[in-house]
Image (cartoon, rainbow, N blue to C red):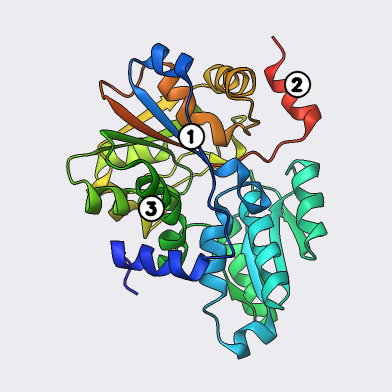
Amino acid sequence: MTASITLADVQDAAARLAGVAQRTPVLSSRELDDRVGAQVLIKCENFQRIGAFKIRGAYNTISRLSQEQLARGVAAYSSGNHAQAVAFVAREVGTSAVILMPADTPTYKIEATLGYGAEIVTYDRYTGDRVALATALADERGLTLIPPYDHPHVIAGQGTAALELFDEVGALDALVVPIGGGGLIAGSATVAKALHPDIRVIGVEPAAGDDTKRSLAAGERVRIPVPKTIADGQAAEIPGALTFPINRRLVDDIVLVDDDAIRDAMRFAFERLKIVVEPSGGTALAALLQQAVGEAQRVGVIVSGGNISPERFVELTRV
């Protein structure tokens, strides 16, 4: 595969993922439709195995490794959901995983990753270069590094969430997707524009982590300080080298939401949709609730994950 993926690559990933990834539900809410003034269709990746979309890209990548690579094991770097996905997939295919995680990663995400059998190595996210550290770790141990977004098989795997959504609901006027490193929206936008060229693809970032918005405005990748936001899964410093060109070509707009808007979206999802979403999983819904995505008759929204402890959920959503 080249760095620029196609609809066929995503379809191939979908065939590989059949029977492995869950076909997650699509929910709707009359109250949400009334508030937004459009029919809203929510792809709920919080119901995915390991609680987030990340299993899609992880499995599509790791399942293609050679027996020699699988015998040596895999490595990854992640603040949580990709860590869990790589650990889970490694166990499923019979290999081992070593995960580099920030020292301040929520305890429940560390425990979940350990529960899938991975080894964890920690670092300081505010002083350490996670890519350099993980690359050195993988090289030292002879492991295959599985990036969280900057890999064509990962991007294609993440795009299968949007492929399922369109297969179930048909054409949409807009698709709203959270952005961290850009893998989910790159895969989703590839599918969306191939199937429905006139659709608007809108990315959503936390206001403190607007690296993609700044990069698109500058026409090149821009690095920002490590963001401090409750949306820890979207605390990227710079867009991916592979994801950015795809998103520059296919994404129509970037919307920013602050932490208060994310909390409101989490509360709305719990009270009205009866689902639990983590902060990063709720940013696209937050943008929609803020009327920040323009006019459209049918809108698709990807809720990317729901990995949050009860204690943290109550802390963030308490009024």
Whichever of callouts 3 and 2 sits on the residue coming sooner in the sequence is: 3
Placement of the C terminus among the 4 image quadrants: top right
Q: Identify the residue at image location x=27%, y=21%.
A: 294
Mark 1 or mark 2, whichever is nearer to me: 2
Q: Nearer the viewer, residue 90 or 209?
A: 90
Residue wearing tag 3 = 163
Of the residues shown, which amino acid type is indicated by label 1? Answer: Gly
Q: Identify the residue at image location x=76%, y=22%.
A: 314
Label 1's element?
A: helix
Residue wearing tag 1 = 209
Residue wearing tag 2 = 315
Q: How far apart are marks 1 and 2 (CA)?
A: 22 Å
Q: Identify the residue at image location x=38%, y=53%.
A: 163
Mark 3 or mark 2, whichever is nearer to me: 3
Q: Identify the residue at image location x=27%, y=40%.
A: 171
Whichever of callouts 1 and 3 sits on the residue coming sooner in the sequence is: 3
Residue occupying the far left of the picture: 198
Q: Quadrant of residue 211?
A: top left
Label ID, residue 139: none
Label 2's element?
A: helix
Residue 42: x percent and y percent?
46, 34
Q: Which of 288 and 230 is in front in this view?
A: 288
Whether residue 182 appears in this view of the structure is no
Mark 1 or mark 3, whichever is nearer to me: 3
> How many residues crowd mark 1 within 10 Å: few (<14), some (14–19), many (20+)?
many
Of the residues shown, which amino acid type is indicated by label 2? Answer: Glu
Residue 154: x percent and y percent?
47, 63
Residue 101, compared with residue 119, is above or below; it is: above
Of the residues shown, which amino acid type is indicated by label 3? Answer: Leu
